[in-house]
Amino acid sequence: EDDEDDDEDEDDEEDDEDEDEDEEDEEESEDGMDADAEAADAEGFLARRRAATEESDFPDEVDTPVDMPARTRFQKYRGLKSFRSSPWDPLENLPSEYAKIAHFRSLNASRLRAVAEDPNSAYAPVGAYVTVWFSVPAEYAESAVAKSAAGEVLVVGALQRYENSMAAMHYNVTRAKDDGDVIRSKDTLVVICGLRRFEAQPIFSEDRHQGDKHKILRFLPPRGSCCASLFAPVAWAPAPVLLCRRHKSGAMTVVAAGSCVGPRANRITLKRLVITALPLKLKKRKATCRFMFFNPDDVRWFKPVELWTKEGRRGHIKESLGTHGYMKCTFDAPIQHSDTVCMSLYKRVFPPYPEDPTVQLDTLGGTPKPLPALPAPP
């Protein structure tokens, strides 16, 4: 019997050792997964930093593909004689989401009408003691009373007319703190506008006061102000706005702050691409350039678009030369071999439309409660 007890004790010790080894292996695997995730995050961060640096050094420049025609790759783009004064129809090629948003013919008149419709309930003097009566479900009233008794603040707000509708909103924001993080256009951010809090994917653009066209910014600039455009619930200026980034831990960091400009569906945001060529032969104001296109059909297709150089010269394509995409160009003054010939192409871009707009229309940005299930038929 003693021998049997000793054997059982030895078996229990071996089982405990096996369990300890399994736990150590699981911990090592978890540590390895964490290390891999951290390495992936670090690589992604470095890649974004490199992309931002390249964008600052060579803004909007792209390479012309060799394996496909340039007229196919850039078929959605067009050239402009002048970015400021050339016409662009704001109602041309609108996405289907524009049928779901509110359009305002006169923004100021709509805002004043919304304020004048119910001035007594929409505003209260600062510092005044008011009594608010409203009808809510019983369970909500009980939780609100309990929270108030515990010392928590109950925030009450009212929505004016049109504020329960989606619109193309624009916010004038400035980078809060340059901590080295790179914020790209269409990154998912948490937007806090007034009482609303929701997730969106804004696009950033230049805040130009002259002209009706604005160039998109691929990254949130570390200094200076810019315009953040997104599809969001209507809000009137000058409502305060915060743009926050949510981390994996759930904590949020403020990346930009500003104010609301208002809904403007006809604001034109353009994406610019710059394709470049190198001068091969020079003779007075004429030049033979290469590497912008790789077949003569592309040269003839983009012949009406104006050329410009990084040293300030202006020109145009005169004719195609050979079968490899070489072209003869004429400029307003002689250029140097060290100069770079460029061509700018533009297309209009729009922010992504949210998959579920009801989440944004909810005041606090929470998930809407599902409807109660219907009773089963008898």
Image: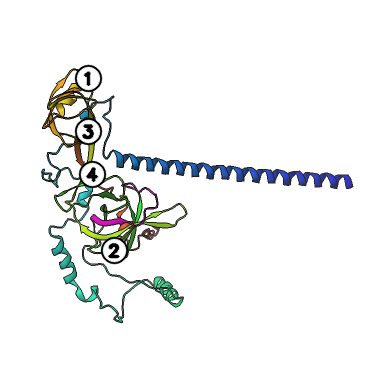
Between discs 2 and 4, the one toward the N terminus: 2
Which label was assigned to residue 186?
none
Residue 279, located in which quarter of the rendered image?
Answer: top left
Query: Where is mark 1, residue-wise?
Result: 324
Mark 2 neighbour class, 10 Å CA radius: few under 14, some 14 to 19, many 20 or more: some
Query: Where is mark 3, residue-wise?
Result: 74
Query: Where is mark 4, residue-wise?
Result: 349
Between discs 3 and 2, the one toward the N terminus: 3
Judge whether residue 166 is colored magenta: yes
Which label was assigned to residue 240?
2
Between discs 1 and 4, the one toward the N terminus: 1
Q: Secondary structure at mark 1?
A: loop
Mark 3 neighbour class, 10 Å CA radius: few under 14, some 14 to 19, many 20 or more: some
Residue beneath the point at 30% across and 53% down:
223
Which amino acid does the dot numbered 3 rest on? Phe
Which amino acid does the dot numbered 1 rest on? His
Rendering coords of residue 229 (x, y %): 25, 52
Which amino acid does the dot numbered 2 rest on? Pro
Q: CA distance from mark 3 to mark 2?
A: 39 Å
Q: Is residue 192 above or below residue 326?
A: below
Q: Secondary structure at mark 2?
A: strand
Q: How many marks?
A: 4
Between discs 2 and 1, the one toward the N terminus: 2
